Amino acid sequence: MKRILVALAALLMFASGTVSLHAQANAKPKVVSEYDAVLANWNDIGRKLIAMAEDFPEDKYDFKPNPQQRSFAEQLLHASGVNYYFTNPVKGEKPPAEENPKREAFKSKAEIVAYVKKAFGDGADAIKAKGEKGMGDRITDPYSKDSVRVADFAYGFIEHSGEHYGQLVVYYRVAGLVPPESRPKK
């Protein structure tokens, strides 16, 4: 009798899994617009860098894994400052004169955190102002002088920020710390 119950239980588990897989296979995938995808990706990498800016100890903001590299603070300032090479052209403005804000201009962690938030917020606002129809607009890339679609241009900056996020993860690890995204979720 016990074998029959175990076999019956296994059969029911298999059947319910099959029904679930069938339902998933027939479910219509959620279609995400290009605008929604660009904005979500922009905000996600911004969230990660902001979390690091807020989390990393202020007394380690000038930490460098080796002397030839940027400090933690300089990495954040660079990753954020470069965003204005996206934001300004999308808004029809000239990009800044320099892509690396000077560390000396930001005396405290709070000032750097505010700058990182502002840079990503300004970029998100530029994307929102363009809207879905504006993702296909063409602008001039200030680096290459090529004509590029806003959405494609945004993804280049999202990737750039992701590369610096990866570098900052290494800064955390070398400093003996665990990055916010690597910590167990509560």
Image: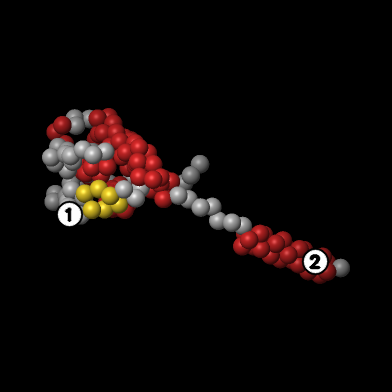
Placement of 102 over or under 178, stated as above or below? above
Residue positioned 83% across, 69% down in the render: 4
Placement of 108 over or under 183, stated as above or below? above
**Residue 117 at x, y percent in the picture:** 31, 35
Q: Nearer the viewer, residue 67 or 147?
A: 147
**Residue 10 at x, y percent in the picture:** 74, 66
Question: Which numbered circle lies on residue 173?
Answer: none
Q: Nearer the viewer, residue 154 or 72?
A: 154
Q: In this rendering, does residue 114 appear at all? A: yes
- Image quadrant in which you'd find residue 73: top left
State which tag comes first along the sequence, 1 or 2: 2
**Left-right relation of 136 to 96:** right
**Left-right relation of 154 to 14:** left
Q: In this rendering, does residue 53 appear at all? A: no
Q: Which residue was labeled with disc 1?
A: 144
Mark 1 element type:
loop
Residue positioned 21% across, 50% down in the render: 141
Q: CA distance from mark 1 to mark 2?
A: 66 Å
**Residue 108 at x, y percent in the picture:** 22, 30
Amino acid on which the number 1 mark rests in the picture:
Ser
Q: Which residue was labeled with disc 2?
A: 8
Amino acid on which the number 2 mark rests in the picture:
Leu
Residue positioned 35% across, 41% down in the render: 130
Q: Nearer the viewer, residue 32 or 107?
A: 32
Neighbor class of circle 2 (other Cα within 10 Å; few <14, some 14-19, many 20+) is few
